Amino acid sequence: MSTPQTNAAQPQYTLAELMVVAAARAFSHDGEVLATGIGALPRLAASLAMLTDNPELMMTDSQAWLLSTPNAISGRAAGDAQAQECWMGFSRIFDNVWSGRRHAMVGPTQIDRFGQANISALGGSYQQPKIQMLGVRGFPGNSISHANSFFVPAHSKRVFVDGECDVVSSIGYNPARLPKGYSLDEIDIRLIITNLCVMDFGGDNHAVRLVSLHPGVGLQEVLDNTGFALQVPELLPVTAAPSAEQLRLIAELDPGNLRSRQLKDNPPGVRAA
């Protein structure tokens, strides 16, 4: 896979900005659903989608208000213009989640080949893990109720594990773990955005499939850092670069440049050869 050539007309961008733009595409065709981006970059991605491809997308202020205009993740929003539509307390959030009208982008600690995710514990036994984390929290109910996507800032075999996750916190495309009455077609895991590539579950029998490689990343590096087999299409494109307008909107949504501190050393979007 060759590295794309840059020219003076192409704006410079960071890997974080490339990932935000790639992640925003996960929400492009959702219509009027509640977008929830967990973390700074997923939140920026949902906000960018709301301002560009999917103006019907809805979002909260992460407290209790439904917004017509996404709020900034740092500093002050441009013009301080945030239209609060209505109160969106926990009871309404739960009604929304269980109705399926939500798309969350989350960052699990482990993901297996089925798309099952873990945010609970690592190693040892379930009763005595080596590392205790958050617990499963809302993952079980969220994963059987609405669409989810994954955001992984450091693509490695520690995240994309061989076998099953140490603790299965959310449902995936594993027939052996389907709840009674569910089918695989009812599971909805959209995209996986990492610092190396974009993937989805569009392979045979919902296998994880490569969608694109980030500029300068080789296929073998992705394969070497994934603990299970990936389906690789014959034609594998390079992840599209952010446009000047997308970069302008990202800067407006993040005036304090919090995005520059989300990836180690804030690497450029086009990796050097």
Image (cartoon, helix red, strand yellow):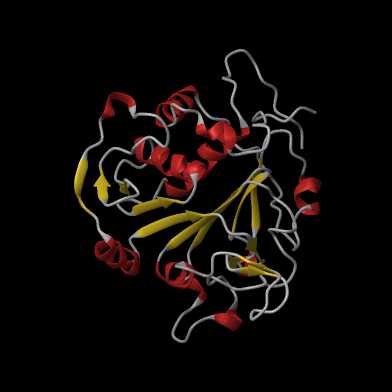
Whether residue 213 is visible here, answered yes or no, is yes
* Residue under the point 44% across and 67% down: 138
* Residue under the point 49% across and 22% down: 244
Find residue 80 and report its image quarter.
top left
Left or right placement of residue 97 versus residue 6 in this view: left
Residue 145 position within the rendered picture, expressed as x and y whole percent measured from the top left: 40, 69
Q: Nearer the viewer, residue 125 or 144?
A: 125
- Above or below, 141 against 80 in this view is below
Single out the residue that lies furthest toward the bottom. Answer: 180
Single out the residue that lies furthest toward the left. Answer: 86
Q: Nearer the viewer, residue 239 or 49?
A: 49
Tally the numbered discs.
Answer: 0
- Above or below, 15 against 234 in this view is above
Q: Quadrant of the N terminus?
A: top right
Whether residue 240 is visible here, answered yes or no, is no
Q: Nearer the viewer, residue 6 or 177?
A: 177
Left or right placement of residue 163 versus residue 199 in this view: right
Residue 51 position within the rendered picture, expressed as x and y whole percent measured from the top left: 35, 35
Residue 125 position within the rendered picture, expressed as x and y whole percent measured from the top left: 69, 79
Q: Quadrant of the C terminus?
A: top right
Residue 95 position within the rendered picture, expressed as x and y whole percent measured from the top left: 27, 67
- Above or below, 89 against 244 in this view is below
* Residue under the point 59% across and 73% down: 168
Find residue 200 and report its image quarter.
bottom right
Find residue 177 and report its image quarter.
bottom right
- Above or below, 180 against 87 in this view is below
Left or right placement of residue 236 versus residue 175 in this view: right
